[in-house]
């Protein structure tokens, strides 16, 4: 009886979570319909409620924004808008940080992660995937040996994580692209390719005992 119950769970749990995520996503996107005048809402025009119209509106807004920003006028408007945000205390720090992360994850135009590393975290017997970033000059001058800045993302949301400074000698540089590393983290290792990462044992010569 137990094995039949587990088999049923294996069918319904992923299906239920998928439907829940879709419902949450569609419901969130449908809130963009509030930008339209009440007389233009599909529910009022059609007389029935059909979820999902917000997805179309969201895609149109995002696409139109991309088209607008690609031309000179749009770039000037974007610089003006960003200039306003950067003049607001506290908001400017949040905006700059989020923008750098989004530029890194969504395009190659931001301060992209330089390398994919293995670092010992959360304890000396464990290894975690990390991205090498930039060490501020003031921090770099405080060290007597070479340190690197690393961002250790959380699973399954790589936009959250921890920012540390670690000795370069205590890291392992991987022959892995940032895209593969992100896919591995998001999928909790399910989508990782076996040949993508060399094991720590293959890099022991790189570490200081």
Image (tube, rainbow, N blue to C red):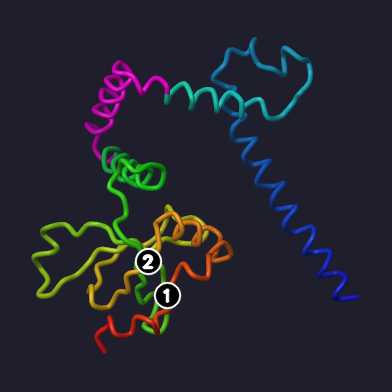
Q: Secondary structure at mark 2?
A: loop
Magenta stretch encompasses residue 29: no
Counting from the top left corner in percent of width and height, residue 14 is at: 72, 57
Quadrant in which residue 24 is drawn: top right
**Whether residue 90 is situated above or below residue 121 in the rendered picture:** above
Residues shaded magenta: 67-90
Residue closer to the observer: 175 or 95? 175
Residue closer to the observer: 185 or 156? 185
Magenta stretch encompasses residue 70: yes
Looking at marks 2 and 1 on the same chain, the residue that comes earlier in the sequence is marked by 2
Quadrant in which residue 203 is drawn: bottom left
Q: Are marks 2 and 1 in contact (CB under 8 Å)?
A: yes
Tell me the tag on residue 99.
Answer: none
Q: Secondary structure at mark 1?
A: loop
Between the C-alphas of marks 2 and 1, the distance is: 8 Å
Report which residue position mark 2 lands on.
175
The residue drawn where x is 27% and y is 78% is 170
**Whether residue 95 is situated above or below residue 185 in the rendered picture:** above
Report which residue position mark 1 lands on.
198
The residue drawn where x is 29% and y is 85% is 205
Quadrant in which residue 91 is drawn: top left
Counting from the top left corner in percent of width and height, residue 116 is at: 35, 63
Counting from the top left corner in percent of width and height, residue 4 is at: 88, 71
Residue closer to the observer: 205 or 128? 205
Magenta stretch, main secondary structure class: helix
């Amino acid at each position: 009886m137990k094995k039949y119950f587990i088999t049923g769970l294996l069918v319904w749990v992923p299906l239920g979570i998928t439907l829940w995520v879709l419902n949450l996503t569609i419901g969130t996107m449908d809130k963009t319909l509030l930008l339209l005048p009440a007389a233009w809402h599909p529910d009022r025009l059609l007389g029935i409620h059909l979820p999902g119209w917000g997805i179309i509106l969201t895609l149109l807004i995002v696409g139109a924004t991309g088209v607008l920003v690609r031309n000179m006028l749009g770039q000037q408007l974007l610089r003006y808008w960003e200039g306003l945000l950067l003049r607001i205390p506290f908001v400017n720090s949040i905006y700059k940080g989020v923008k750098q992360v989004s530029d890194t994850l969504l395009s190659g135009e931001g301060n992209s992660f330089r390398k994919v590393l293995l670092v010992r975290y959360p304890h000396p017997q464990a290894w975690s995937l990390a991205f090498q970033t930039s060490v501020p000059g003031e921090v770099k001058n405080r060290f007597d040996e070479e340190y690197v800045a690393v961002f250790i993302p959380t699973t399954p949301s790589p936009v959250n994580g921890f920012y540390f400074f670690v000795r370069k000698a205590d890291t392992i540089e991987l022959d892995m692209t940032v895209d593969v590393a992100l896919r591995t983290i998001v999928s909790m290792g399910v989508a990782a390719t076996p040949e993508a990462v060399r094991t720590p044992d293959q890099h022991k010569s790189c570490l200081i005992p």
